[in-house]
Amino acid sequence: MSRTRRDPRTPPALPAAGLRVVALGGLGEIGRNMTVFEHAGKLLIVDCGVLFPEEHQPGIDVILPDFTSIRDRLDDVVAVVLTHGHEDHIGGVPYLLRERRDIPVVGSKLTLAFIEAKLKEHKITPVTEQVAEGDELRLGPFDLEFLAVNHSIPDALAVAIRTAAGLVLHTGDFKMDQFPLDQRITDLRGFARLGEEGVDLFLTDSTNADVPGFTTSEGELTPAIDTVFRTAPKRVIVSSFASHVHRIQQVLDAAHEHGRKVAFVGRSMVRNMGIARDLGYLRVPKGLVVDMKVLEKLPADQVCLICTGSQGEPMAALSRMANRDHVIRISEGDTVLLASSLIPGNENAIYRIINEFTKIGANVVHKGNAKVHVSGHASAGELVYCYNIVKPRNVMPVHGESRHLRANADLAIRTGVDPKRVVIVEDGVVVDLVDGRVSVTGKVPAGNVYVDGNTVGGATEASLKDRRTLAEEGVITVVAIVDADTGQLAEAPDFLARGFVHEAANFDAAVPVIERELARAAADGVTDAAQLEELIGRAVAGWANRAHRRAPVVIPVVIDA
Ligand SMILES: [Zn+2]
């Protein structure tokens, strides 16, 4: 009897009554959240976000989920549902719609307004379907129900997905603030109702699963923010996410209270706050927000600027102010308020900015020294409540680095979920829900897709390695003119070095190394220029390592004499 071996990475066909769940992003990282649900031959996508690059990814603008596994099935996609308007949930949509323009985009009023503004910049007019909490929507074989959740952006939704395979509840990003500015709390009564019906698979936000207790209410920040405005001797410069409507509302209220005028700085901040104001999510007292030109003429203690860049993003207003590369110059006595969280990976960039402003003589207020920010994500206590209310049969922690996913899984198990029914998986792992049980059945590609200028997917891990090496070790170009008859150097090779520590060094010592390599190649009958280049490259790299303990990028060029 012969058995055909199946690639363990390729999942088997999905049983007719099964549901397949594949996260293409958001598992093992904070960002580019994207989950694909498959049932009865159709696909439903929940969120499509971007991940922001770290220092070891030079030259990269954003990182996208890998669409490879759905690329030849785009016609089966019934919709992309956006749980809320954060970049790590909507930023990838323009790139997804480039592949198929008419994928319906489903989301709440504010979420759709944010994504439509973004898509306009990409010259894409999407097909949209606006929903609100309490709404139900049938999309192919998926029956959706939307529930209000509270998060660091208004109008966030959780989504319940009913199919023949069972009931799934995906929280999106959420927390359980009982006193939010807009009084729109997470719909725990809805969660409980679904729990009574029987939740077969619960996907929950893991971002703060390793933080004990409960996330502090937004309302408790008001005194600290008020103190900043009451005591600041000169200008107040606030940096926050361009989508944190409620935090910015608190800042506007404090500025108004203490007689300051406000200007928004930065394209995304101006755009999003305009949208939030037009749609009624941001209340702006008359005459409070003014043009930069008006603001510049006011005394410093009547000025408040609100800008982006709270994560140290190099191109955002705040970094450029720290580098004195912005029309707004921070000066002695100014107060800089960082009303934002520290997303893992951004710490160095943020502390560098704090140091720069401190050196100038500004007073920097941040969550480390004042109660000016709280997270938008549920802490362990809130997650435990949810598990006890929903009583899910199976759990798949989402949105978090490995340690967050593990912590969230442990919480589920502590509330009594069978450990065998809690799946901790990484991006691309295929999870099937069949007969009420989850199991891992395979893996699909889910690597990083880099956006580099106008190029999507052009930069690879190998090219990023080259960039890091170039930055750290420099480059040596060797031009060798080789006599085609003898295989020997026709004349001494040229060396050009950039960024190599021994730029001025004498490369004479490398010449015999090249000569030896060419002699050996000639003896072996190797005459092909590409092969000779490879040999010379390796020889010069070896020489740089032995002689200088360096590993520069070596670019060999062989020219036939
Ligand atoms: Zn979010």
Image (tube, helix red, strand yellow):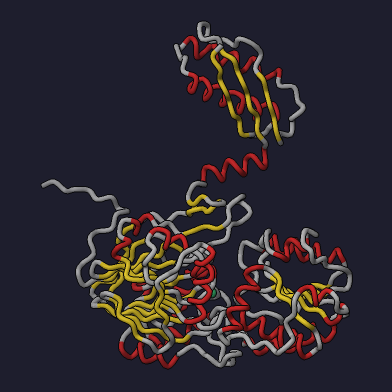
Q: Is residue 105 left or right of residue 453?
A: left
Q: Residue at x 30, y 53 (%)?
A: 8
- The quadrant in which residue 553 appears is top right
Q: Which of the two residues, 214 or 265, is positioned nearer the viewer here?
A: 265
In the rendered image, residue 231, in percent from the top left (x then y), is placed at 85, 84
Q: Residue at x 86, y 81 (%)?
A: 301
Location of the C terminus (image quadrant):
top right
In the rendered image, residue 282, in percent from the top left (x then y), is placed at 62, 85
In the rendered image, residue 211, in percent from the top left (x then y), is placed at 58, 76
Task: Name, please, the residue furthest toward the top.
Answer: 485
In the figure, 91 relative to 392: above or below? above
Q: Which of the two residues, 231 or 345, is positioned nearer the viewer here?
A: 231
In the rendered image, residue 116, in percent from the top left (x then y), is placed at 50, 72
- The quadrant in which residue 208 appears is bottom right
Q: How many marks?
A: 0
Asked whether residue 412 appears in the rendered view, the answer is no
Q: Is residue 360 left or right of residue 25?
A: right
- The quadrant in which residue 259 appears is bottom right
Q: Residue at x 84, y 82 (%)?
A: 302
Task: Name, please, the residue furthest toward the left.
Answer: 1
In the figure, 89 relative to 98: above or below? below
Asked whether residue 535 appears in the rendered view, the answer is yes
Q: Residue at x 50, y 73 (%)?
A: 206
